[in-house]
Image: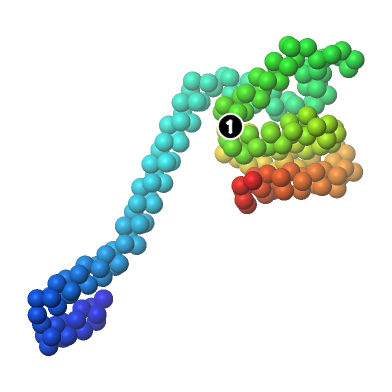
Amino acid sequence: MDNILEVLAIWVSKNFDWNTALLIVLLVLILVWLYKSPDIYRNRVHDDRTADAAQQLQIDSYYRDANGQYIKENLDWWNEFLIDPEKKAHEMSGDEDAPIDQEHINLLNKRMAFIVEFSSARTVKLLSIYMQKTYAGDIDSDGTLVCISYIVASLRADYTGEKALPMDLLQIKFKDYGENEKKYKKISRTIKKETGIDDHLNYRRLK
């Protein structure tokens, strides 16, 4: 920067007129702007991130304080779905041969509404993948377990900040995990491909 100004000073001393003076002023202003712009950009990014973080903390605090018990009840329900899927399946559908009535439909709708209203875009995406496979009849019991493990892991990340691996959750529950590991991992790869998330629930690309 100093060398450039020195060269400009020498050139002006030999070629001075008012047009040249105006040109020099413009060049100096441009050079100063270029020199300072990285700092301005960094400060703006920092301010934006700080404001976003503060806003997110306010939102999180509001939801936790105003809806803490409701959130806890639903988190417990989804956790129980992974721990005892047969019990939850019966809870949602009733007896095996009985038609699904409105009460059971309302129960499932309530649990889905919680995710849509309070959870991250990632969790909503995982729920949508699971429900579309369910509607299409394109999912078996193993597929259900893997999908629910992803939903539970994502909910846990939403409300505790801790990212448990979905496959780890399955290993905690099922002693025969090793026998079905290849099948679970194949389903997991499909989920990751359809959602764009990786093993740690981070987006590689948003689908």
x and y percentages locating residue 125 in the rendered image: 65, 37
Which of 53/140 is in front? 140
Residue extending farthest to the bottom is: 14
x and y percentages locating residue 106 in the rendered image: 69, 15
> Callout 1: helix, strand or loop?
loop
Decide if residue 78 is on the left or right side of residue 8. right
Q: Is residue 174 visible?
A: no
x and y percentages locating residue 150 in the rendered image: 71, 38
Q: Which residue sits at x=63%, y=52%? A: 204
The amino acid type, in three-letter code, at marker 1 is: Ser
Quarter assignment of residue 121: top right
Decide if residue 194 is on the left or right side of residue 27. right
Which of 70/21 is in front? 21
Q: Is residue 116 above or below residue 66?
A: below
Q: Which residue sits at x=61%, y=47%? A: 206
Quarter assignment of residue 159: top right
Badge 1 density bin: few <14, some 14–19, many ≥20, Cα 10 Å: some
Question: Looking at the figure, which quarter contains the N terminus?
Answer: bottom left
Q: Is residue 170 above or below residue 205?
A: above
Q: Which residue sits at x=80%, y=43%? A: 187
Which of 20/200 is in front? 20
- The residue carrying mark 1 is 119
Q: Is residue 196 above or below residue 13?
A: above
x and y percentages locating residue 154 in the rendered image: 64, 37
Quarter assignment of residue 20: bottom left
Q: Is residue 49 visible?
A: yes
